[in-house]
Amino acid sequence: MFEFKWVYELILFLYGCSLIGYFIDFIQNNRKANRAAFWLLSMVWGLQTLFLLRQIFVEENFPVMTVYDGLYFYAWILVTFSLIINRLFRVDFLVFFTNVVGFLVMLLHISTRAQSVLDDQGIELVHEMLVAHITLAIISYGFFTFSFIFSLMYLFQYRLLKQKKWNTKLLRLGDLTKLDHFSYISVILGVPLLLIAVILGVTWGYVSEDVFYWYDSKTLGSFIVLLVYIIYLFLRVVKGYQGRAISLFNTASFLILLINFFLFGSLSNFHF
C-alpha cells in the first residue's frame, strides 16, 4: 500500500481542502466555494477510483473482505454519493456532513492500514498525521486570534463613537462594518481547520501506540473550543447576531481558547 504513500497524502490534502470549501458554502451560500470544493472532491474520487480498480483487477481482490478494506470502499461510496447529490440537488447540510464523515472514514482506513503494515513509511505516515493535527490546530488558533483582535477593535471603535470622541484613533481603527465582517470571516476559516485537526488528532490517538483518553483535559478542551465557535457561527448566521453583541461573545470565546491552550495543555496526559 505505502509505495504510493504520497498519493494517499495528496488524497487527504485534497479532501481536507474540499471540506473547507463545502464548509464556507454551507455557512455563506458561496457558489464559488461550492464549485471549487466539488472539483477538489472530484479529484479525490478519481484517485480513489484508480486505487479501487487496481485492487479489483490487478490484485484480484474486491475490497470488502476485511474491516480495513471495507472502510476504503465505504469512503468511496460516500464520495460518490456526495458528488451526485451536489450535482443534482441543492442540499448543503447533507453534502457538508457527508463529507465530514467521508473524510473521517478515509482517514481511519489509511491510518489503520499504516499501523498494521508497520513499515517505515507506515510509521512515518502516522507521525505526519500528528504533525498535521498540531499544525492545523495552531493555524486555526491564528485565525481565531485575528478574529478576536478585529472584535476588540470593533468594541473600542464602538465605544469611541458612543462617547463621540472624534479623533485620529477613530479614523485609524477602520469602519465598524468591515471590522465585524473580517472577524466573521476569520472564524469561518478557523472552524473547518480546527475540525480537521480534531479529526486527525482523534484518529492518531486510536492508531498510535500512545494511550488516548477521551476525558483528557486538552481533548475535552479542544472539543469545547470547537463547540463554542460553532455556537458563534450559529448565532451569527441563524440568529442574525451582529455588531457589539457578537463581538462580546467572540471575545469570551477567545478567552476559552486561551484557557484550553495554556491551562488544559499543562494538565494534559499526552499533549504538549
Image (cartoon, helix red, strand yellow):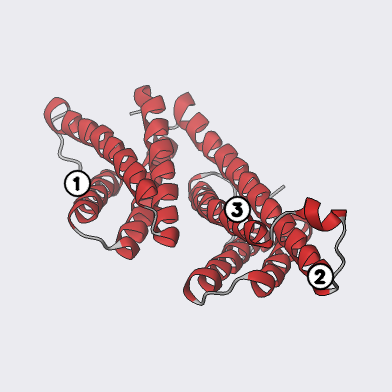
Residue position for label 3: 186
The image shows residue 87, relative to residue 245, as above or below, that is above
**Residue 159: which numbered mark, if any?**
2
**Image check: 187 left or right of 126?**
right
Numbered disc 1: secondary structure: loop
**Residue at the spot x=26%, y=48% of the render?**
79
Give coordinates of residue 103: x percent, y percent: 38, 49
**Residue at the spot x=65%, y=70% of the render?**
243
Q: Could you tell which of marks 3 and 1 lies nearer the N-terminus?
A: 1
Quadrant of res 160: bottom right
**Residue 97: which numbered mark, if any?**
none
Task: State how far apart marks 3 and 2 are (Cα).
Answer: 23 Å
Residue position for label 1: 64
Quadrant of res 37: top left
Q: Determine if residue 263 is in view.
A: yes
Give coordinates of residue 63: x percent, y percent: 20, 41
Task: State how far apart marks 2 and 1 are (Cα).
Answer: 62 Å
Residue density around tag 2, few if under 14, some if 14–19, many if 20 or more, within 10 Å: some
Q: Nearer the viewer, mark 3 or mark 2?
A: 2
Give coordinates of residue 238: x percent, y percent: 47, 74
- The foreground one among 189 and 237 is 237
Amino acid type at mark 3: Ser
Furthest toward the top, the residue is 3
Q: Nearer the viewer, mark 2 or mark 1?
A: 2
